[in-house]
Amino acid sequence: MSRRSLCGSLRFGLLATLLRGFFVMQFSDKRNRLKFWLVLAALLLLPFITDALLGRSWVRIVDFAMLYIMLALGLNIVVGYAGLLDLGYIAFFAVGAYCYALTGSPHLALAFPMMFPAGVHLPFWIVLPMAALVAGGFGVLLGAPTLRLRGDYLAIVTLGFGEIIRIFLNNLDAPVNLTNGPQGISRIDPVSVAGVSLNSTQHIFGIVFPAVHLYFYLFLAFTALVVFVSRRLERSRIGRAWMAIREDEVAASAMGIDTRNLKLLAFAMGAMSGGASGALFAGFQGFVSPESFSLMESVMVLCMVVLGGMGNIAGVIFGAILLALLPEVLRHIVVPAQQALFGRTLVDPESLRMLLFGTALIVMMLYRPAGLLPSRVRRRELGADEPAAETSVYDATH
Amino acid sequence: MEILLQQIINGLVQGSIYALVALGYTMVYGILGLINFAHGEVVMVGAMLVLSSLTAMLGWGVPPVLALPISVMLAITGCMALGYGIERIAYRPLRHAPRLAPLITAIGVSIVLQNLAMMIWGRDYHSFPQLFANTTHSFGGAVINDIQIIIFVMAVAIMAGLMVVVHHTRLGRAMRAIAENQHAAQLMGVDVNRVISITFMLGSAMAAVAGLMVSANYGLAHYYMGFLLGLKAFTAAVLGGIGNLRGAMLGGLLLGLIESLGAGYIGDLSGGFFGSNYQDVFAFLVLIAVLVFRPSGLLGERLAERA
């Protein structure tokens, strides 16, 4: 493991080393423990370093990158471990976000002035598990009918769900104003930890922590939790069963694996993780509207998982960081470059980004199906290195 | 009563378009066992090609009688090339890969097409030029216009033609043989790759015609139109039994009817809580219901689960 992580550091630079170091934390030899503390220190200092070098707006971008990491890791459970294609993942994120938006803002006062004259203001720590459960419930509702069929149906049903949820969010403002339609819900309560609101600058031990820094630490803690859970799942009986299903469903069920329930579990866990991230997003942003949850976002999160390496935590994190920062990079490069070359902007960065995502999905599947940082099992299975194994596995199932 | 009749007419016209697109899904599925996610985008490209060539030619003073067939042929050729290219680039290299791989490239292709279309044709709605006086005929209190009649008749004719091709020609026999068993078909001397390419091209040609019909029916075309249309046509294919040609036609017509009747009556049924802006939800509910109660579809004999 440590040899591998050294190779990785040479290839992908400092960032990957930091990440990999983070994952070996449970290895107890001395060098790794030192590495763990170094990584932790670097991560804790990250918002301050970013702030000093690039400015406050970049700390916000880093915060969003953390959210994307959580989302990508959640989707990785579904796509990477269990091999199920979820094309509407952002819908669960939306469910979680609207859960918090409704139960932590003055908005419901509009719909039910008699019942809630000041809206509903549940504490974040109650809403968070609730958001996860509601999103998980939607996952079960969608997954139960489709998961006993072949995987393609799940892909198309989730694709449809992602679109349907937006229709509901956009239209449920009449006759009872539940979602406030396309305008979205604003004035969402800030998240507070131990009575400290994260939306205002805090002074702790004489150090000034602006709101974006505080949210960074919150997201860091949750990302660490998701990484921990993913890692434990991966090596558990359940995780191994998921991978068996992914590799050959018929064989897996012949070995006594309850494929349907385990697929449902993977799908629901992914949905729950998405819902929890959604609640965090709503608290951080203070505002939600349907346009944050378009198909493009689902594709982007899928792209993070595919690009980084399906089923590999470090790879997925790498992919998430890469793609979360890409729009910022594009914004700073594409427009000036075109202005210089053609004198006007022919292609806006937004559509170029989507074009790149689509191309990346195709190219990755054709030439490097296991991702940029592949997991060992996945690489063997997707046959990037061993063309001989690939055809024989396929024929056995037909 | 007039409203009911009107909704049925609208539903049948819309349904015949769904059926044409659904045929493209079901043909590819029958032969390759693959859902061609990008098919909806091919419809969109077809509509855009017809529209832009048509407006260009009308601008040059070409008479509509000439301009329409030329632009339709152009769109059909363009879409056939596109369908061929999609299969060649995104599906053929992955024919023996794990099933997740072609699904991911399929969504990739559809994103790429959507964004390319947006770059070429912009974000605006394009309106369909008026070619002839579109007279409306009324009977029994309901109205139907010339365009709707042409759409319905054309769709039925194309579907009949497809049935002839599939059931009474050498090519059709090869297609059915591959659907039955690809390896055995190959052993019998069927050029599998060629037949698969032709299948994609046939499906794309129908998609181009469907694109023309949609834009003529609504008078509009838009780079995003392929997405929901594709989703609905897929639902139609599943409703009829995916892989089954007659099923796709039946499913398309039924889905059109369900949607139009549903949108027409949902307001009354829910006491005004839901309005016709929930029209797009029906296809999805139908899809879920079919998958729960009859995954093999109305006419599908084979079980939907095929290893």
Image (tube, coloured by chain):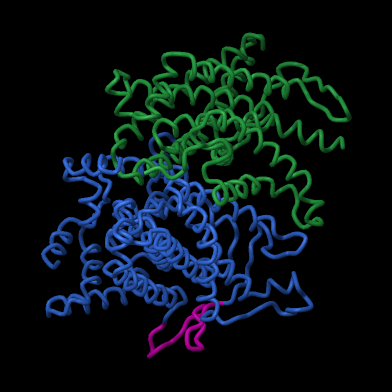
Identity of the residue drawn at 11% across and 64% down: A3
User: Is A338 left, or right, of A145 in this rendering?
Assistant: left
Who is closer to the viewer here, A61 or B290? B290
Who is closer to the viewer here, A155 or B187? B187
- Residue B222's x, y, as percent? 59, 35
Q: Residue furthest bottom?
A: A205
- The quarter of the picture where the N terminus of chain B appears is top right
Who is closer to the viewer here, B110 or A391? A391
Looking at the image, can residue B226 be seen? no
Chain coloured blue in this rendering? A
The image quadrant that residue A38 belongs to is bottom left
- The quarter of the picture where the C terminus of chain B appears is top left
- Compared with A82, A132 (above or below) is below
- Residue A14's x, y, as percent? 21, 63
User: Is B75 left, or right, of B305 in this rendering?
Assistant: right
The image quadrant that residue A124 belongs to is bottom right
Identity of the residue drawn at 62% across and 46% down: B286
- Compared with B36, B187 (above or below) is above
Chain coloured green in this rendering? B
Looking at the image, can residue A186 be seen? yes
| Magenta segment boundaries in residue numbering | A190-208
- Compared with B61, A40 (above or below) is below
Asked if residue A205 is among those painted magenta in the image, a careful observer would answer yes
- Residue A98's x, y, as percent? 59, 66
- Residue A177's x, y, as percent? 73, 64
Who is closer to the viewer here, A289 or B29? B29
User: Is A378 left, or right, of B165 in this rendering?
Assistant: left
Identity of the residue drawn at 76% across and 34% down: B8
Query: Could you tell me how many numbered marks the image carries?
Result: 0
Asked if residue B43 is among those painted magenta in the image, a careful observer would answer no
